[in-house]
Amino acid sequence: MRWESWSEFWFMGGYGLYVWGSMGMTALLLLLEMVQARLAHGRALALARAEKALENS
Amino acid sequence: MTMRWFYYAAPQTFYGLAGRLWPWLAALALALTLAGLWVGFALAPADAQQGEGYRIIFVHVPVSWMSMVIYLAMAFWAVLGLTFNTRLSGMMTRALAPTGAMFAFLSLWTGALWGKPMWGTWWVWDARLTSELILFFLYLGYIALTSAIDDVRRADRAGALIAIVGAINVPIIYFSVKWWNTLHQGASVSLTRSPSMAQLMLWGMLLMALAMWVYTLAIVCYRVRTLIIERERHTDWVQALPEVAGAKA
C-alpha cells in the first residue's frame, strides 16, 4: 500500500478532481446502465405476461 | 459444427444460454474490477512525469478500447444479419449499442479530465479526439435510427448499414496517432515492442481492460434476453417460460 492516509489518497497528489471525476463518472454510468437494463427486462416480462393474459381471456 | 452455431443462433436457445452465462460473467467482471483497482490504486507507483494524475489511464484506456471493440462487434453481427438474415444478429447489434455509446462517452469524458491538467485544455480538434467523437455520434445515430423505424427487421437492416459503414472509422481512430501529428500520445501498449510502462501500471490497466470486456459480455447477454422477450413475446415458448407463465401456470 503506497498511501499514508485516506486524505492523501483522495487528494491524489493534487489531481483528485480529475482522477475521481473520471472514476466517479464511470462508476455512475455503469450503475445507471445496470439499473436501466434491469428495469427494461422487467417491462419486457410484464409485456409478455399481459400478452398471455390477453390470449387466455 | 455449422449446425451447432445455427442452433445457438436461435433466439430460444440463446435465451437460455445467455441466462446461464450472465451471472458468472458479472461476478467475474466484479472480481477483475476489484483486482484492477487494487493494483492500479494501491500497488502501482506514481508516474515520473504525471505524478498521481496518470491513474486516469486505468479507466481511460479500457473504456476507449471497448468503445472501438464494441463497434467492430456490432459491424460483425450486422454482416451476419445481412448475410444469413438470422433473427439473433439484429438483437445482438442492438444490445451492444448502448454500452458502446456509454464507453465512447466515457472515453471523451475521462480524456477531457486527463487533458486539462496535462495539456492545459479539456478539448482540442485533434485527429484522435475528433475521430472518437465521430464514433460517439455513430453510436447515437445507430440508436436513433433503429428506434425511429417501427418495423424491427427493417430497423435492423438500416442499422446494420450504419454499423458496417461506420466501422471504417475504427481503424482511423486507432492509427490516428501515427498518421497525423496529434497532441494525443501514441499507443502505450503494442504487440511489436515491449510496453512503455512500469509492470504494475501495465497490469492494472490490463486487469481493468479485461474487467470491461467481461462486463460488456455480461450486460449484452442480459440485454439480449430483454430484446428476445420483447420481440418473441407472442410465441409459445416465451409464453411458457416460468418467468412469464408464473407460479400459477
Image (cartoon, coloured by chain):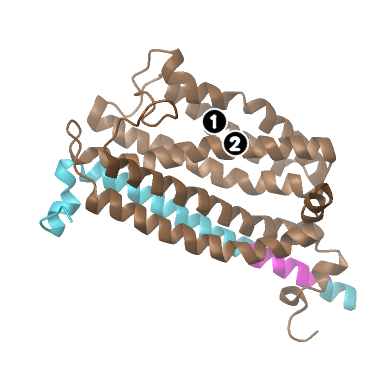
Chain colours: A cyan, B brown
Examine the rendering and report whether any part of residue B151 can be seen. no
Left or right side of B155 for A18 = left
Q: Is residue B194 above or below residue A7?
A: above
Query: Tag 1, which chain?
Result: B
Tag count in the figure?
A: 2
Front-most of A8 and B58? Answer: B58
Examine the rendering and report whether any part of residue B81 can be seen. yes
Residue at the (48%, 56%) spot, across then down: A32
Three-letter code, disc 1: Leu
Front-most of B45 and A22? Answer: B45
Residue at the (35%, 52%) spot, across then down: B36
Q: Residues within 10 Å of mark 1 (few under 14, many from 20)?
A: many
Report the predominant secondary structure element of the magenta stretch: helix
Q: Position of residue B115 (x, y in %)?
A: 30, 30
Q: Position of residue B43 (x, y in %)?
A: 23, 51
Is A46 inside the magenta-drawn segment? yes
Q: Which mark is residue B135?
A: 1
Q: Position of residue B160 (x, y in %)?
A: 73, 35
Q: Are marks 2 and 1 on the same chain?
A: yes
Q: Is residue A6 above or below residue A21?
A: below
Mark 2 vs mark 1: which is more N-terminal? 2
C-alpha distance separating marks 2 and 1: 8 Å
Q: Is residue B63 above or below residue B24?
A: above
The magenta stretch is A41-51
Residue beneath disc 2: B71
Q: Quadrant of the N terminus of chain A?
A: bottom left
Is B3 inside the magenta-drawn segment? no
